[in-house]
Image (cartoon, grey):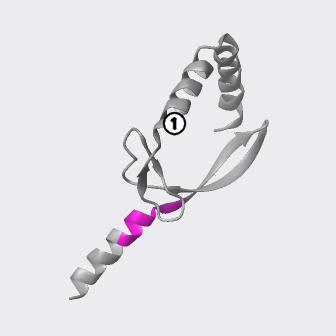
Amino acid sequence: MTTTASKFMSAINEAAGRLVKKIVIRDGKKVLIKYREYSVPCKDGYKRDPETGACVRMTAKERMMRSKAAQRSANKSSTKRNRAISMKRRSSLVK
């Protein structure tokens, strides 16, 4: 009986995700952020529901807007240049 209960509890904890603390750089400063890390990522076209932790299908409009925004952002020359500069700066800050 306890084996079944422990398996059930581990399944619940896995679905909830584990809380992770990470040091990241935001606006040129080191910041500690906390977020949930899930063992299974959501499939394409799905997003994580913040309340339940389950994967929920995005609306067609949401998927289309997200795709177009990513494409616009990726094709800007300034994005590529800024990323290269940022990665140099970050490599010196985060060890």
**Mark 1 packing: few (<14 Cα in 10 Å), some, or many (20+)?**
few
**Percent coordinates x, y for residue 45 in the rendering:** 41, 39
Q: Residue at x 66, y 11 (%)?
A: 77
Q: Secondary structure at mark 1?
A: helix
In the rendered image, the quadrant that contains the N terminus is: bottom left
Give the side of residue 14 with respect to residue 78, left or right. left
Residue 14: say if magenta.
yes
Looking at the image, residue 2 lies above or below residue 51: below
Main secondary structure found in the magenta portion: helix
Quadrant housing residue 28: top right
- Label 1 sits on residue: 61
Give the side of residue 94 with respect to residue 64, left or right. right
In the rendered image, the quadrant that contains the C terminus is: top right
**Percent coordinates x, y for residue 55 in the rendering:** 41, 53
In the rendered structure, which segment of residues is drawn in magenta? 12-19
Q: Amino acid at mark 1?
A: Lys
**Percent coordinates x, y for residue 81 in the rendering:** 68, 14
Looking at the image, residue 4 lies above or below residue 91: below
Q: Name the foreground residue: 25 vs 52.
A: 52
Residue 35: say if magenta.
no
Q: Residue at x 65, y 29 (%)?
A: 91
Quadrant housing residue 44: top left
Q: Residue at x 32, y 69 (%)?
A: 11
Q: Residue at x 29, y 79 (%)?
A: 6
Furthest residue in direction top, as rendered: 77
Looking at the image, residue 17 lies above or below residue 89: below
Q: Name the foreground residue: 91 vs 79.
A: 79
